Amino acid sequence: MSGIGSPSMLNRDRTILDRSEAIARIEDVAATAEDFDRIVSQSLPLLLDRTVGYIKRFLRDTGQWSEDVAHEKFVLRWGAEYLEQFLVSGRFEVPCRPLFLLDSMVAKQHSRPEPFCYHPDLLTPLGRFLDGLVGRAAVSRDALIALYHHCYGLGPGQVIATLRLNGSESPRIYKNFQRWRDSGWKRTLEDIGLTAPDLQGLTEQCHQQRRRFNGEAERMLRFVQAHYRKSEPDHYPCLSRHQWEDMFLQGYGIEYRIWHLALCLNCLQTAWDLGFAGASAIEKPRVALQFQP
């Protein structure tokens, strides 16, 4: 039987002390960006746990929380995104107290009308699929290139033509597609929490009411894309038709085109139209979801 002074009691006391010390560190003032990085890097698990707790509370308050694995993964994913935003923006807020800065950032996000993190559409199988896919694309080039297939049914050759890639750049696209099929797709599904029955259900809905289903998917996709484009640098805005035409003519901005067009249907359609000179035989990309790689 465990008692005072036993190893289990000492370990528990040590854990409590470690947590108290971690909280004390992130309550301290970070005077410089270097101080901020050092303090935060020592307390990442605590900060993530705190952020996840806030999100769960807001979901419960709005009646959109369920005690299941899908919601747990959903909350963990959004907590990680908030923490990522905090790590980047916090360096520009010094001097500050990191703990209170994180609290204010999350509160600000949840004070907006219909904050993205608990939008009801994102809790449906279709919403989780699109959110997980586009969210992964914001950090993975393989997932980004895969968006052309999963959202629009485009193959690597069509992607290469749309982006105006040359011979030395084209093999990268084929490699992206292959790596996605080999491992990226499976890992992403596991992260999203979608099962084979979930995908089968989405596939059946799409077959039964293809036009209506893809129309609803397009509405949600635009919503999700707009959110994740906020993670792009400030100098990556949507371009006008003239600006896209100039970029293609000058042959610069290849990385910009790769990242931006997959995350913006309007710009993708504009670039497609310019690339194929409005050829009537080749339709502009439309949302046509694919649930297999």
Image (spheres, helix red, strand yellow):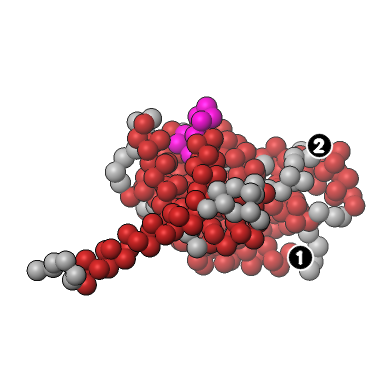
Residue 77 image position (x, y, % from top left): 46, 50
From the viewer's perspective, tell me whether residue 163 is left or right of residue 245: left
Q: Residue sitting at 57 percent across and 35 percent down?
A: 223
Residue placed most toward the observer, 129 or 11: 11
**Closer to us: mark 2 or mark 1?**
2
Q: Residue sitting at 86 percent across and 38 percent down?
A: 242
Q: Is residue 112 magenta?
A: yes
Secondary structure type for disc 2: loop
Residue placed furthest toward the left: 1
What residue would you read off at disc 1? 169
What residue would you read off at disc 2? 240
Residue type for callout 1: Glu
Secondary structure type for disc 1: loop
From the viewer's perspective, tell me whether residue 108 is left or right of residue 122: right
* Magenta stretch in the rendered image: 110-119
Is residue 13 shown above or below 200? below
Q: Residue sitting at 87 percent across and 55 percent down?
A: 251
Q: Is residue 53 magenta?
A: no
Q: Which picture quadrant has residue 271?
A: top right
Residue type for callout 2: Ser
Q: Residue sitting at 16 percent across and 66 percent down?
A: 4
Residue placed most toward the observer, 35 or 208: 35
Q: Which picture quadrant has residue 11?
A: bottom left
Is residue 186 shown above or below 63? below
